[in-house]
Every structure is written in C-alpha cells, then in structure tokens.
Image: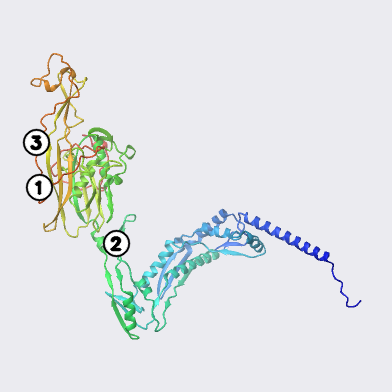
Amino acid sequence: MDGQRIAKSEGSRKRGWIIAGAAASVLAAAYLTTCAWVSGKDAILPNVSVAGIDVSNMLVEQARDKVAAAVAEQSENITFTLAYEGLSETVNGGDVAVDVGQSVKNARQIGHENFFTGGFQFLSHMLGASAQVPLTIPEDDPAMTGLVDRMREAVASREENHAYEIKGDRLEMTKGAPVVTIDWETARDQVRTELQTAFEDALADGGRTEDTFTLTPTQSKEGEEPDFGAIHKELCAEPKDAALDLETMEITDHVVGIDFDVKELQEAYRQAKGGETFSIPVTVTRPKVTKEDLGGYLFRDLLGEATSEVTGAASRLYNVTLSANSCNGKIILPGEVFSYNDTTGPRSVANGYRLGSVYVGGKSEQQPGGGVCQTSSTLYYAVLHTELEIVERRCHQFAVGYVPDGMDATVYDGGIDFKFKNNTDYPIKIQSWTYDSGGRRYITVQVYGTNLTGRYAVPTKSVFDWVSATTVYVPKEEVPRGTLVLDREQNAYSGRKAHTWRTIYEKDGTKVETQDMGGSSYKMRPHTYYYNPADGDPTTWVNGVPPTDPVTPVDPGTTTPVDPGTTSPPVDPGTETPTDPGGTAPEVPEDPGTAPPVDPVPTPEPSDSGLKPLDPGSMAG
C-alpha cells in the first residue's frame, strides 16, 4: 500500500470552511462591538497626552481643567526668541493665546475619527501604543504674528549685509552678490510649530524654558537671478497716515510709501556686469500726516466757537447742560461723520432728561429733552465758523432767538438730526459746557483741530419776508368778564425767512469762496387772548371796552387778525442773490427756545473737568 493516497471526503472540507467562517464571524462581531463601544465612549483613550500632560481615560472637561492649570502655571516661564543674523525678537509664553479647549478636543478625537478603525486604535493603546497631541496655537494669535512681523520689520530696515537696499529715492543692487530673501509665510508656520515644542518642553520639565529659533533664509546662488517679486514685496509698502487710537489715546506710526517697477529692476540686473552695483528710481510717497506731525498738531487750533444765552425753566437749563456734557470731549476722526442724536443718545427720562417745552404741530407742550436744540444750534453756529462739511441740518418751525436766524439746527429723536463731517486730515474735538456769568446762564461750544493753512470762515445771513405776529381771540368760560387773558405758554413769534452763506478767507484776508448754506423759513405764531364768551367778540368792543349788557356770544371759531405787517426783500450779502430758502420746517416736536439774541459775552475757561455740575438748584430762573 506504499505510496497510496487517501482522499479526504468532500464533507470534511465543507465542515472546515464552516468552522473557519463561524470563527471569523465571531471575531468580526466582537471587533464591531468594540468599535461601537469606543465610538460611544466619552473618555479619551488610554496612553494619550496633550503636550506631555497625561489625559488618559479622562472626560473632555477633566482633561481641559488639567491642561489649563498646567499651562497657566508654566506659560510665564517660557521665553521664546526668534533670531536672524544678529537680530532677535522675544515673546513670553504668557502672552500666547493657547487654545486648551481645542487641544483637548483633538486628544478626544483619537480613536473617534473612523468607526471601523476605532476598535483597533483602542486595542493598540491597551497594549501599550501611545499618542501625543500638541497644544493648539491659533494661526492668527497676536503674540505669535506680532513676533514675526517685528522680525520682518527689523530685517527690512537693516541695510548692512544686504545685496540690495533703499537709499533715498533709489534702489541699489549688486549683481552677483548673494541675495537673501525670507519666506515669511513659511516662517510664521515654523514659529508656530516651535512655540508648540517650547510649551511641551516647559510642561514636561516643569522649569524655566528658553527656546530660540533661527530663521533660515532662501539664498540665491552666484549668477542666479534673485526673486524680484519677493524683493518688491519685502521693500514696498503703501503710505499710511499716523492716526489717533481712540481706545488707547495713543498715536499710531505712519508708514512711508515705497514702490518701484519690478520689470525695470529685472532689466537693469540683466544689463549689469557681475559684481557691478546699479540702481533704479524708487517712488517715495510720504503720508499726509506723520507721527511727529500729529503729535505736535493734535487739537492745537481753535477752528470755530459760538456762545448763546440759556433761559427758561430750570428743567430746560438742566437739559441744555446734560446735552452739552454729552458732546464735550467728543473726537471725530478724519472722514468720520458726527451725529448729534447718536452722541447724546435718546432724550428720555431714563437717560436723565427732564420735561421741557417742545413744538408739536405748531403748539408748545412738555416733553423729555426740551432745550437740547439749543446745544445742537450753538454747535451748528460754531461749525459755521469752520470749513467742516455740513451733512444734515434743519431749521426750527419758529425763530429761536438764541442764535442768529438761519444758523439754528433743530433735532428730534429718530427723525431729524444734525450731522457734519470731518473733512480735514486731522482729528477734531468738541468742547462744550454751560456756565454762569453776570447772573445769566450761557453755553459755549468750541471745535478744536489742526489748521495748517490759517484759513477761517465767516457766516453771514439775509433775513426777509417778515410777518408780524397777529392777534387772535379765543372764548373761554373761565375768564372773568370784562378782561382779556394772554396765553403765555403759546408765545407769539414773527414769521420770516433767512438765507445763510459761509465765506472762506485765507490767513491774509483774501476771499477764497462763498458757500451757499441754504435757506430757513420760520412760521408766524399769533398772540392769543382768551375772553369770556358773554362779553362778545373783543373785535366788536367800542374803544376796547366790553359792553355792560349781556350779548349773544359770537362764533368762537371766528378770529380777526390784525395787520400782518409788511415784507422786505432779502439783502444781498455779497455777489449772490438768495433763492427760495426752502420749505416749512417739519411738524415734529422740537425745542422752541426762549432766549433773545445776545451780544457777545466774555467766555470763561471750562473747569478742570470741562463740565458744569448738574445742580438743579443752581439753574432756577
């Protein structure tokens, strides 16, 4: 029987495949069960650390607290230095905005990226495999980007050991000399990685860490053309004016604009001999406002000012002071538009304003904020003495008296605003305050800025079409017979129109131009007298004496106006003829104003704070 083979039966082979398949199914099921368990597991896998800090089997919140505590304890001990050919810039680890939350989330993601690989990663970590996640530093972290930017400026400003440099209005280059350029985008990524390593070293050692990273430049070979585009990017800049930072109240640096023709540089390079130094012209653009200029010129000149007398009830005086305080110290940067409504905020009781007289539909009534139009009008009058651009201004329904006709500015919450634009190259500042002088209350508004030319503005006006206040009689049962009672709440106003101009002069008095500031139309409001209806219409009284016998009351709706007066044409202030001064003021609440025009009065200096205390007891009268 030697050599005889005994064949296995077909049934035995099938049983083997079935057993193997069953075993594989069991293993697959077990693995999928493990994957599902890992997928639903909230804790971080075993043997996982964040920058050397063990966070194994921790929940995200626990790991975040542990890592955050370690970073807070050690970050101040980290000193990171960026170096390049003798230059260095340093940042402290405490200034770097480490994103601990994202770092821990990245640690939690290990084993959770893919359902089918999660089981394998878990098992491998159980058997000793490990993983470390670096601390996350945002790409736009100010400390990191500032470090790179400071080094970039230092490299660009240093002239020695350069194959090219800016000298005055020329760019000099030596052909054949090693040309050094740095890829600053790559450098920023390298610094971010090195900072992460510095944090890992500090957290692992628990002591002070001083890490230095040296930039490696891209250096061209002898005879090889440099990267002209990179040179242009390194040397050129857009001009930038110095500016006032309103948050820090510090003046930012200006930037001198540099530009040159890349093709011209390339062509000059190709025509030059080896070792030869050549140059091309550079366009140098100085900014309009330098740091030195702004520091010396800031708010040095009084551009315009105005003063008006404040009268009326104590609540009105209070509102004028409150609105003046809101405007005091307001800074408007070049190109910005000042809004009176935005500056004072809503004139409401909640914001401290008191009831004062306003116009509603031609009638006077009490509303919060009555009086604030005197501040806006005095400010407008001050701005008329400057070259600042008027953006929005409306006149009152009735002439106010505390500023010249045509030079007032009414305002109303949510409807009418007074706006002007800072069209100068320098910031301007408003100073406004109320004060007492000679037993009277005044408001003064000053506009400070920088006037390099010495120009000044003079506002003028023409007032015409006067309409005298008429008289009307209104029956009222409460009035004693034989008497007339004047309505002292609805004061009478003469109607008229006004046109305003602003003439600009050079420092030596030479006229530059006359600007048409538009027209104003003020309504007439009559004297209103109340009489007892039993006395009859006062217009029928003989010699102004009411009859002694009762009479039939006349229709109270009839009134007899007196002579409305005469009108006169406008006076031409210069070479221009006034046109239609505009329509009637809108029928919205506005400050009526009660003060007559006043002569110029001495303007005392503001107090140390620049504000008048809001003492209602001192404003009576």
Q: Which residue is mark 1?
A: 572
- Residue 303 lies, in percent from the top left, at 19, 53
Does the image show residue 616? yes
Q: Which residue is mark 3?
A: 566
Q: Is residue 272 left or right of residue 307?
A: right
The disc labelled 3 sits on which kind of residue?
Thr
Q: Residue furthest front?
A: 10
Q: Give the mark nearer the N terminus: 3 vs 2.
A: 2
For disc 2, the marked residue is 242
Closer to the camera in the image, 229 or 576: 576
**Up-down relation of residue 595 to residue 337 (above or below):** above
Q: Amino acid at mark 1?
A: Asp
Identified at 19% across, 60% down, the residue is 452
Which of the 4 quarters of the picture holds residue 529? top left
Q: Nearer the viewer, mark 3 or mark 2?
A: 3
Cα–Cα gap, marks 2 and 1: 44 Å
Q: Earlier in the sequence, mark 1 or mark 3?
A: 3
Among all residues in the image, which is located at the extreme right?
A: 1
Which corner quadrant of the image does residue 442 belong to?
A: top left
Q: Are marks 3 and 2 in contact (CB under 8 Å)?
A: no
Mark 1 element type: loop
Foreground: disc 2 or disc 1: 1
User: Number of labelled discs?
Assistant: 3
As measured in the structure, the alpha-carbon distance from the residue carrying label 3 to the one carrying label 2 is: 58 Å
Q: Is residue 270 above or below residue 106?
A: below
